Amino acid sequence: MSLDTLNLLRGIATLLAMGAFVAVVLWAWSRRRRETFDAAARLPLEEDPGFVGADRQPPARR
């Protein structure tokens, strides 16, 4: 394989990687995904419905 062919393949690989990156950015910032991502961002702040309080005993180890 000549150096010119190798450089051409590297350029094509770079363009494909850049295209994939742009596609992921557009997908992540699309309006259709906003509600899903907002819900996922709030997950760490929501209360666990099974959590009673600080006096709750940890589960027994087996």
Image (cartoon, rainbow, N blue to C red):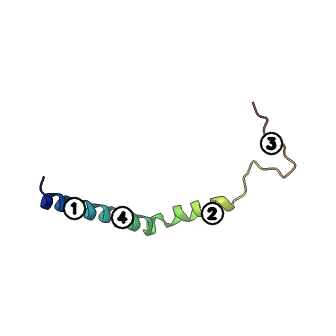
In screen coordinates, is 37 left or right of 13?
right
* Residue position for label 4: 21
Q: Which is closer to the viewer, label 4 or label 1?
A: 1
At a point 36% along the width and 64% down the height, the residue shown is: 21
Task: Name which of mark 4 and mark 2 comes first in the sequence.
Answer: 4
Distance between mark 1 and mark 3 Cα atoms: 55 Å
Distance between mark 3 and mark 4 Cα atoms: 44 Å
At a point 63% along the width and 63% down the height, the residue shown is: 42
In screen coordinates, is 58 left or right of 41?
right
Q: Secondary structure at mark 3?
A: loop
* Residue position for label 3: 58
* Residue position for label 1: 12
Q: Amino acid at mark 1?
A: Ile
* Residue position for label 2: 42
Q: Which is closer to the viewer, label 4 or label 2?
A: 4
Residue lying at the far right of the rendered structure: 55
Task: Name which of mark 1 and mark 3 comes first in the sequence.
Answer: 1
Q: Secondary structure at mark 1?
A: helix
Distance between mark 4 and mark 1 Cα atoms: 14 Å
Alpha-carbon neighbours of circle 1 within 10 Å: few (<14), some, or many (≥20)? Answer: few
Q: Amino acid at mark 4?
A: Phe
Alpha-carbon neighbours of circle 2 within 10 Å: few (<14), some, or many (≥20)? Answer: few
Task: Name which of mark 3 and mark 4 comes first in the sequence.
Answer: 4
Alpha-carbon neighbours of circle 3 within 10 Å: few (<14), some, or many (≥20)? Answer: few
Q: Amino acid at mark 2?
A: Arg
